[in-house]
Image (spheres, helix red, strand yellow):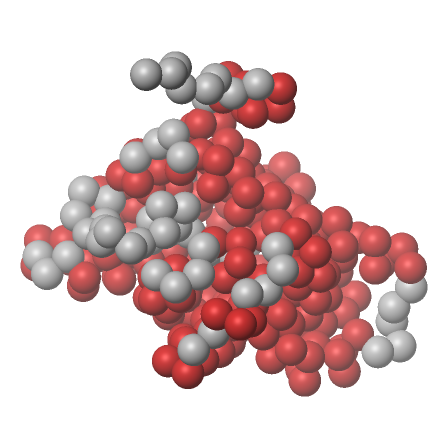
Amino acid sequence: MSAEPQPTGPSRAIERVPPWTMAVASMLLIQAAAALSVPLVEQFGAAGTAWLRLAFGAVFFVLIARPPLRRIRRVDVLPLLGLGLATGMMMVAFLSAIDRIPLGTAVAIEFLGPLTVAAIRSHNRRMLVWPVLALAGVILLTEPWHGAIDLVGVGFAALAGLGWAVYILLTQRVGDRFSGISGLSITIPIAAIATTFIGVPQVVGHLDWRLLLVAAGLALLAPVIPFGLEMLALRRMTHTAFGTLMALEPAFGVLLGLLVLQQVPSVWQAAGVVLVVLAGAGAQRGGLRRRGAGDDPDLAPLEERV
């Protein structure tokens, strides 16, 4: 038997990079894109910024992978439309949240969505302890005893968490029919079209070429480059290891909020982040989907999102 060919050139260089560093880089890029979007939100509004990022993201994904339109069957239409709408709602709601509350707090609240999905789908009542633990962390993050909670911002973050939960469920259905990038080349344009109606009115009259370049760069930061990094990481990591590592995302949200937006957490808020991270890691013990023979091996676990 002939020896299996060894990777050469760029592939060999990628193989030398520890996969966990790709997952961490993906999370950092996602949170950096969120933090750097705040000035654009002030300029265009949350819906306008979301539409610009999704529109540029749609262009990039269509250029990278031709949308497999001929493979779409009638039963695929509703899941694809639903996934696109959930993606658009998630981004608009999340950007609306970080316009009103700290980035780390918004990420932690949003994180309740996938944690709840993991607990419910595990069919194990003991798994419900993780969303409850995360909720306790969110309470510490919002510090209600100070009487200064922005309920609208919290509501937007919770709506983003609902969108993330729906995104997870529909991604699993769409992923059984379309591979990661080819699926995104369909759903991201749908998300861009869906947000056009609320995004374009906020953008009209405020555009210039510099802001367009910034929006294009943010689209590359998330979701284009992070998704590619996650795919590379998943080829060499178990889903449990990957999902546990992704539980650090709320902590990275706090870190980028501190470094980019100068949002300094209190001691109680730092403790809240620790609880949310522990809840996310614990949920991975029983929150993974049992994979079938036809499942796409490039799909991330419950924490994967745009």
> Does residue 117 appear left or right of residue 260 in this picture?
left
> Does residue 25 appear left or right of residue 200 in this picture?
left
> Residue 1 at x, y = what percent?
32, 16
Residue under the image location 54 percent in, 34 percent down: 25
> Does residue 265 appear left or right of residue 43 in this picture?
left
Q: Nearer the viewer, residue 100 or 36?
A: 36
Task: Please identify the quarter of the rendering in which residue 65 is found.
Answer: bottom right
> Does residue 244 appear left or right of residue 152 in this picture?
left
Relative height, residue 14 to residue 245 (above, below):
above
Residue under the image location 31 percent in, 54 percent down: 295
Q: Nearer the viewer, residue 94 or 177?
A: 177
Q: Nearer the viewer, residue 188 or 276?
A: 188
Task: Please identify the quarter of the rendering in which residue 32 is found.
Answer: top right
Visible residue check, residue 50: no
Task: Please identify the quarter of the rendering in which residue 226 is found.
Answer: top right
Residue under the image location 41 percent in, 83 percent down: 74
Residue under the image location 30 percent in, 35 percent down: 238
Relative height, residue 90 to residue 229 (above, below):
below
> Residue 211 at x, y = what percent?
84, 58
> Residue 10 at x, y = what percent?
62, 23
Visible residue check, residue 305: yes
> Residue 280 at x, y = what percent?
30, 46
Total marks placed: 0
Looking at this rendering, what residue extends furthest in the front direction?
A: 1
